[in-house]
Image (cartoon, helix red, strand yellow):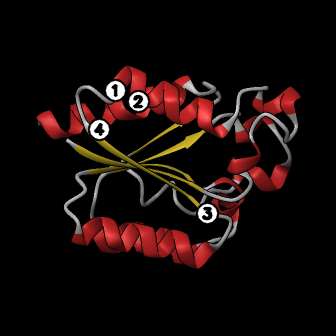
Amino acid sequence: MKILVLNGPNMNMLGIREPEIYGRETYQDLVDMILRKKGGSHEIAFSQSNHEGDLVDAIQQAYFTGVQGIVFNPAAYTHTSVAIADAVKAVGIPTIEVHISDPDSREEFRKVSYIRKAAAGTVTGRGFQGYIDAIDMLEEIASR
């Protein structure tokens, strides 16, 4: 299965950014863990951007390159970006929304997710393991 793991703003700052919420592991640690656990079974590409349009472009490009599933942590754009939600809807690729923390247990504004209605599922509050759970969900969707 060809999978895109897409991460939004500030995810490149993992390990530095609010470690009490996101932990001390880095973005590279995340990539390495996913490849170690799922890379042997799937073709996995990674992309991270702090720019909304770049994330929309990555979602659209996934359509044209035959990606079969997207694991997506839109980060702060979860709560603000109609454009990203529309891109997920437009391509029709099963997408699992992932968050390292549990946004529903944090500030009130974080409880709003524009992408959730466009996503095939959501994993929150499971740390890096949430990405593996999301790939498992994509595998389940593909087997139907």
Contact between marks 1 and 2 (CB within 8 A): the answer is yes
Taking 102 as reference, is 48 left or right?
A: left
Q: Which of marks 1 and 4 is in front?
A: 1
> Which residue position is annotated with label 2?
35
Q: Please, is residue 89 above or below residue 75 in the view?
A: below
Residue 49 got which mark?
A: 3
Q: Which quadrant of the structure image shows residue 136?
A: top left
Task: Depth check: give the residue in front, 55 or 44.
Answer: 44
Residue 85 x %, y %: 49, 68
> Which residue position is annotated with label 4?
138
Task: Depth check: give the residue in front, 139 or 54.
Answer: 54
C-alpha gap between disc 1 and disc 2: 5 Å
* Residue drawn 61% across the image and 63% down it: 49
C-alpha gap between disc 1 and disc 4: 12 Å
Quarter of the image with the N terminus in it: top left
C-alpha gap between disc 2 and disc 3: 19 Å
Q: Which quadrant of the structure image shows residue 66?
A: bottom left
> Which residue position is annotated with label 1?
38
Label 2 secondary element: helix
User: Given the image, on which type of amino acid does mark 1 rest?
Assistant: Lys
- Which of the two labelled residues, at mark 2 and mark 4, occupies the earlier sequence position? 2
Taking 124 as reference, is 133 left or right?
A: left
- Which of the two labelled residues, at mark 1 and mark 4, occupies the earlier sequence position? 1
